[in-house]
Amino acid sequence: MAETRRRLRSSTVVLGGMGVLAAALTSCGSEPDRRCVDRDNHTLADGYKVVADKNCTSSTGLSSSDWYYDSEVTRGRADYGTFDRDEAVDRGGFGCSSGSGGG
């Protein structure tokens, strides 16, 4: 009985420690969530229109497209984010310091 109890405790500690480590690693990633948006297609009520990523990664895409970081996306529109990647990284999370970026 004592052996079973000991094994259960050590499993709980290992699993709990892995969860904390996973949360720390995922919250301090070097690349924040991003969406390619059309800067010329914005409404105050809904935000920017999300467009295909190829518009932000190739020179033949929309000239008004740009990466929009850490935004909320609803019905193909992105809002409440930032165009400044460094600002998005500095927002941080659990275990992150606001003065350091990851990349």
Image: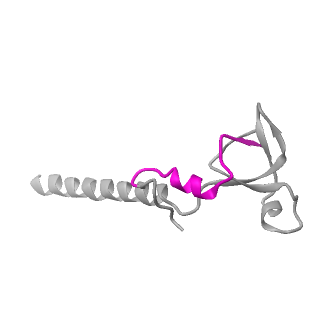
Residue visible at 62% across and 57% down in the picture? 85
Q: Position of residue 11 (x, y in %)?
A: 26, 57
Q: Position of residue 56 (x, y in %)?
A: 78, 61
Residue 83 forms part of the magenta stretch: yes
- Residue 13 appears in which quarter of the rendering? bottom left
**Residue farthest to the left?**
2
Residue 1 in the image: above or below residue 101: above
- Residue 62 appears in which quarter of the rendering? bottom right
Nearest the eye: 10 or 80? 80
Looking at the picture, the colour scheme in use is: one colour
Q: Position of residue 100 (x, y in %)?
A: 46, 61
- Residue 32 appears in which quarter of the rendering? bottom right
- For the C terminus, the image quarter is bottom right
Residue visible at 66% across and 40% down in the picture? 80
Left or right of 28 in this view: 50: right
Nearest the eye: 62 or 50? 62
**Residue farthest to the top?**
45
Residue visible at 87% across and 62% down in the picture? 61
Left or right of 6 in this view: 12: right
Nearest the eye: 31 or 85? 85
Total label count? 0
Residue visible at 37% across and 59% down in the picture? 21
Q: Position of residue 79 (x, y in %)?
A: 70, 40
Residue 99 forms part of the magenta stretch: no
Q: Give the magenta part as a residue range.
A: 76-95
